[in-house]
Image (cartoon, rainbow, N blue to C red):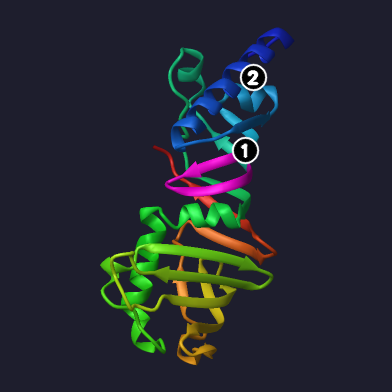
């Protein structure tokens, strides 16, 4: 097949960019701004192979998780180019490793705590490890209000009772994180903050406890700053 003319190449690029943007919109609940840049030579492009895709997005909500900024890079992406050129939706034909740079502010994280995904993680954590706490929570159904505070090398998560539940002290945990094998977050220096009496109680039994992020995730770096969390790593996007 001969190489497309510059005009045809430009048209194919515009169609692909539009199709990819539309597909990305269907994968998230909200995105404020979205930029897509396609990298690829003529010959692989005509074979449905993109040398690379670069995505920059702001104000993203995915499965209830809020992100201020997302940068994605994917290489050697196989797509259904022929169908796209006939007006069909964009699809991935093979799993795609994606390098990502994610930024969450403290506001993002607090909004994300209301998502079923994170609420499930926190409930599972308490069900498994509440007996190690200095003061463990009552029934989890009464502890649905959660807040988070991000400081350099420290994440504080507070779980508070409903207004109708009286005389129940909130459970406030503070920890740093290490990484293990990319997919596990490991608690480091965990402690519980108590209000009666006011004190910070170390929780050595929780030191090294790991939270599994899933087989398709590989985190290279996690940075807790002042009011911001930055995550760099790789995830695998599956077709379908």
User: Is 136 drawn above or below residue 81 in the view shown?
Assistant: below
Badge 2: residue crowd in 10 Å (few <14, some 14–19, many ≥20): some
Q: Main secondary structure of the magenta part?
A: strand
The residues tagged by marks 2 and 1 sit, at their Cα atoms, a distance apart of 19 Å
Where is mark 1, residue-wise? Answer: 57
Residue 40: image x %, image y %?
68, 29
Residue 74 appears at what percent x and percent y? 61, 42
Q: Residues within 10 Å of mark 1 (few under 14, many from 20)?
A: some
Q: Is residue 45 left or right of residue 166?
A: right
Residue 50 occupies quadrant: top right
The magenta region covers 56-73
The residue under label 2 is 13
Q: Residue at x 51, y 86 (%)?
A: 207
Query: 78 and 65: which one is in front?
Result: 65
Please tell me which residue lies in front, 134 or 19: 134
| 238 inside magenta stretch | no
Pinpoint residue 193: horizontal percent, then vertical percent: 51, 82
Secondary structure of the residue carrying tag 1 is: strand
Identified at 53% across, 64% down, the residue is 148
Relative vertical location of residue 108 with respect to residue 200 in this rendering, above or below: above
Q: Residue drawn 40% across and 69% down? A: 160
Residue at 39%, 62% (x, y): give it: 145
The image quarter containing residue 154 is bottom right
Q: Earlier in the sequence, mark 2 or mark 1?
A: 2
* Helix, strand or loop status at disc 2: helix
Q: Which residue is at the front of the view, 175 or 7?
A: 175
Quadrant in the picture for the C terminus: top left
């Amino acid at each position: 097949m001969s190489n497309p003319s510059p005009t045809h190449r430009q048209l194919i690029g515009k169609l692909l960019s539009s199709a990819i943007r539309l597909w990305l919109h269907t994968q998230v609940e909200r995105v404020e701004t979205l930029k897509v840049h396609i990298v690829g030579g003529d010959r692989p492009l005509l074979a449905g192979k993109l040398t690379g895709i670069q995505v920059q997005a702001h104000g993203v909500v995915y499965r209830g998780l809020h992100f201020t900024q997302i940068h994605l890079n994917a290489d050697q992406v196989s797509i259904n180019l022929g169908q796209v050129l006939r007006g069909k939706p964009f699809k991935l034909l093979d799993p795609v490793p994606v390098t990502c740079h994610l930024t969450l502010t403290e506001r993002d994280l607090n909004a994300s705590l209301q998502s079923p995904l994170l609420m499930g993680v926190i409930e599972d954590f308490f069900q498994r490890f509440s007996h190690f706490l200095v003061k463990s929570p009552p029934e989890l159904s009464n502890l649905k209000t959660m807040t988070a505070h991000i400081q350099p090398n420290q994440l504080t998560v507070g779980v508070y009772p409903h207004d109708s539940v009286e005389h129940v002290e909130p459970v406030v945990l503070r920890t740093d994180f290490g990484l293990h094998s990319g997919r596990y977050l490991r608690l480091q220096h965990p402690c519980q903050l108590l209000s009666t009496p006011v004190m910070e109680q170390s929780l050595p039994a929780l030191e090294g406890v790991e939270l599994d992020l899933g087989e398709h995730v590989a985190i290279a770096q996690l940075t807790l700053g002042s009011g911001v969390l930055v995550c760099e790593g790789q995830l695998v996007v599956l077709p379908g």
